[in-house]
Image (cartoon, rainbow, N blue to C red):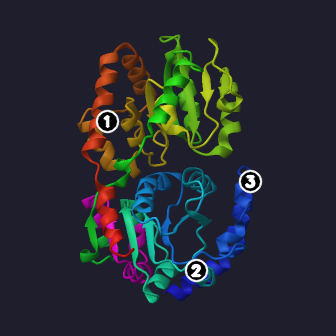
Amino acid sequence: MKFFYSCLFYLLIPSIIARLLWRSIKAPAYRHRWRERFACYTKKSVQDVIWFHAVSVGEAEALFPLARKIQRQYPEVTLLITTTTPTGSARVRTVMQGSAVHVYLPYDIPCAVGRFMRHFRPKVAVIMETEIWPNLFAYCGSHGIPLYIINARLSEKSARGYQKIPALIVPALAQVKLIAAQTQDDAGRFVAIGAKAEKVNVQGNIKFDVEIPSGLISQGRQLKTGAFRGRFVWLVASTHKDEEAIFFGVYKIIKQKIPGLLLVVAPRHPERFVEVKKLAWQHQLAVVTRTSGEACETRTDVYLADTMGELKMLYAAVDVAFVGGSMVPVGGHNILEAAVVGVPVLFGPYMANFKDIAEQVLQRNAAIQCRNDDEIIGAIIALHADSAQRQLLAQNGKAFVQENQGAMAKIFDLLALDM
């Protein structure tokens, strides 16, 4: 089965390259460093690395505290962090500041996998969340490289898909030393797709171990009093296509009740910054961009956060935060960063990627779920009028995060056995 999978992958390479070029029209970074995706490198090899793979920004952000802990405890080791997306790459380079090697993960074709592995010779391979690559996993198994899947999660939809190709997935999972699942449900789904039960255990979610430097909190407070001029600020974070139109329409209604309202929009993908700005203009909203360096005037409706890597700071600058990717069927995004900063959190109906966390925060009165426009309007107006409720939501959210921390330390102890 793996042979036919590899043949199909080779046949799809022209289409894959065409897709990269197509995506590069809006995001030029997709046409850069494309040779890395085939494990063709110009720099001298760095070997005997501890290798982590984080697909994009969300997985990378979860990984950083663990990576820093490893660097502190094992300063002699070299970390390699691979990503798939340019935004993930940019975040790794910004946060790690050269202390870790970064390249794009090569495509799962035997020749590229072999070149990648020979170039870096990883001592340990660690995959974040849900990435099952048959050729990559097979190489680790045949060369005795300990392979882990950490912070592992598997949705019901993904599990159903994997169960259709057991001849490919079961042998791949057999090469994994340990799957550290986020929840018991995730663990059960990994077993259902072919993982050995003794190789799967529940360690919790390392996203609870998020680190918020005090300096970012101070920057956020300064932004609130400075550029935002002390207005009541509502942030919609990590928005996707078709979501901004919802929030711009809702904002115009809420503005009638809260004249001092300022809407801060932080799109998930940088290639959409210009698109979102134009959309705001189409809604006849006055926009100030973060990169302009300008302060908001009284007439300013929208502050467009057209930068990357500043979301934690922005959470500290606002009164209420709505985490996007949840008003359209994307699956939602991480609400824990907002909660640990201490801002009231709202999210929409589509939270499949964070189902358990969403259910728990709602039970704890630590967030508000809004299923439609009317519920968003009602929630923002109610929170504006009730500072005590805002404070209660923020306190409950922060407590919820703190009570669930500790997964990172457990996973560190597991990985340390092979370092």
Q: Tell me the number on the disc at residue 372.
A: none
Look at label 1 and name its amino acid.
Lys
Range drawn in magenta: 160-189
User: Where residue 53 appears, x then y in whole percent?
Assistant: 50, 65
Q: Label 3: state its secondary structure.
A: helix
212 vs 69: above or below? above
Q: Which quadrant does the C terminus fall into?
A: bottom left
Look at label 3 and name its amino acid.
Pro
Mark 2, residue position: 113
The residue lying at 45 percent from left, 45 percent from top is 333
Instruction: Report how far apart the C-alphas of labels 1 and 2 lie in the structure.
Output: 42 Å
User: Where residue 202 appears, x then y in whole percent?
Assistant: 26, 63
378 vs 307: above or below? above
Mark 1, residue position: 398
Nearest to the observer: residue 18 or residue 396:
396
The residue lying at 25 percent from left, 60 percent from top is 184
N-terminal-most mark, 3 or 2: 3
